[in-house]
Amino acid sequence: MPRRSKTDRAGFGVLTYFYSIVSLLGLIATLGTGFLLVRGPFLGGTLLKPVPLMLALAGFVVGIVVLTWGATRTVGVGSRV
């Protein structure tokens, strides 16, 4: 019976940490741009001009995509066993 390495930490490797950081960056982008989008109408601030508003919306969508991609890769959804 083969012996397991004690340095493996239950299967957490370098890629898991990388995808966790990618997920964290996606979460930060989503929260930051989401705050810019809702601060005007809901928190008493002024609404952004049209171009910055569209850039914030694009950043929000990119943040959601990066967050989802990193999170699914971190937990191994769709990976072969």
Image: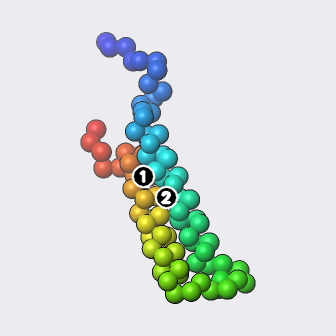
Do tag 1 and tag 2 residues touch (Cβ < 8 Å)? yes
Locate residue 15, reporting x and y percent. Answer: 40, 39
Label 1 to label 2, Cα distance in Å?
8 Å
Check disc 1: other Cα within 10 Å, few if <14, some if 14-19, many if 20+: many
Locate residue 48, reporting x and y percent. Answer: 59, 84
Residue 13, by quadrant, is top left
Residue type at numbered disc 2: Gly
Where residue 61 is drawn, which disc sits there? Answer: none
* SS state under label 1: helix
Residue at the farthest left position: 80
Above or below, 28 against 73 in this view is below
* SS state under label 2: helix
Front position in the image: 49 or 8:
49
Front position in the image: 17 or 50:
50
Q: Looking at the image, which residue is at 48% across and 80% down?
A: 54
Where residue 70 is drawn, which disc sits there? Answer: 1
What is the total number of numbered labels drawn onto the structure image? Answer: 2
Q: Looking at the image, which residue is at 45% across and 74% down?
A: 58
Residue type at numbered disc 1: Gly
Q: What kind of colouring is applied to the model shown?
A: rainbow
Locate residue 33, reporting x and y percent. Answer: 56, 70
Locate residue 21, reporting x and y percent. Answer: 49, 47
Q: Which image quadrant: the C terminus?
A: top left
Dot 1 or dot 2, earlier in sequence: 2
Q: Looking at the image, which residue is at 70% across and 83% down?
A: 45
Residue at the farthest right position: 44
Q: Which image quadrant: the N terminus?
A: top left
Q: Looking at the image, which residue is at 56% across and 59% down?
A: 28
Q: Which residue has dot 2 on it?
A: 26
Front position in the image: 46 or 74:
46
Front position in the image: 26 or 47:
47
